[in-house]
Image: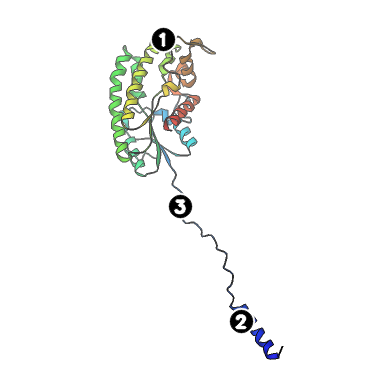
Amino acid sequence: MPRFALVMAAAVTLLTACSSTPPAPVPVPASSSAPPPAEQVHLSIGDSYATGFGPGGTTESFAQIVAKESGLKLVNLACNGATSADLATRPACGPDAGGKTQLDAAVEVLRGGKTALVTVVIGGNDLTPCALVQDPLDCATRTVAGIQTNVAGTLTELREVAPDVKIVGLTYPDVFLGAWVNPSFPNGKNLARQSVTMFQDFNTRIAAQYDRFGAKFADVTTATGGYGALTELTQDPKYGQIPASVAKVCTLTHFCDRTDVHPTPAGHQVIAEAVTAASR
């Protein structure tokens, strides 16, 4: 090949190499600047059943168990000793109260838009005095009417701000069944018998109130052995042969041996399971 041709061939090769498109750079994933999803809330209002108060001090309550097992942040506004009227008239408790009533503080939490579940446990402190009067059933009938009014007022305000949020209302164990074996009650067996009718009436009327507002109802009385026939006996290690429903209440509450209406740790677990089942 002539020398000129060799030089031209080399030049063409060099130019081709220099003008070829370089390989595309490997893309580097962009760092995400989006914030993590906001933590969802379990909002709890009510009385000492929600706080976990008991004769040995404060323990893990059903509300804490539900929040933990559901992966929710618990905002607990409940107060020991609260009545149904107190929800709208007395300051809430806990670090999120902000000096407001339970109802006002709950409305503020709901406005944040992060609430996945609301639980309401109230009415037990309204009813407790009826165990000590001459006619417990008449007392309970009159008292439940007031509880219904107060619960309706609470649910009205909750629904106004959060019409679709999941709400679960709770009832209570029939603790007065424990009067069957509790020596503090001379007429304990009679009170235990009357309590079955009292709780049936209370739960029917309160459940209907929650239903009016599209809320679920956790029948804790059933879950903790209430309504059972007192003729169905079992052998209890401490009290001997007693009605099976009485034995269950003795295991799940402190009423039989301490005249204390609060649940045992096992009782709180059963209540939490009833709430979870009702919320599905």
Q: Residue 270, image x and y in percent?
A: 48, 26
Q: Disc 2 residue type? A: Leu
Disc marking residue 35: 3
Colouring rule applied to residues: rainbow
The residue to which callout 1 is attached is 189
Name the one closer to the observer, 140 or 91: 140
- Disc 2 and disc 1: Cα gap in Å? 107 Å
- Disc 2 and disc 3: Cα gap in Å? 51 Å
Q: How crowded is mark 2: few (under 14 residues within 10 Å), some or many (20 or more)?
A: few
Q: Residue 44, image x and y in percent?
A: 40, 34
Of the 4 image quadrants, the one containing the N terminus is bottom right
Q: Disc 3 residue type? A: Pro
- Can the viewer see residue 101? no
Where disc 1 sits, the SS reads helix
Q: Disc 1 residue type? A: Lys
Where disc 2 sits, the SS reads helix
Disc marking residue 125: none
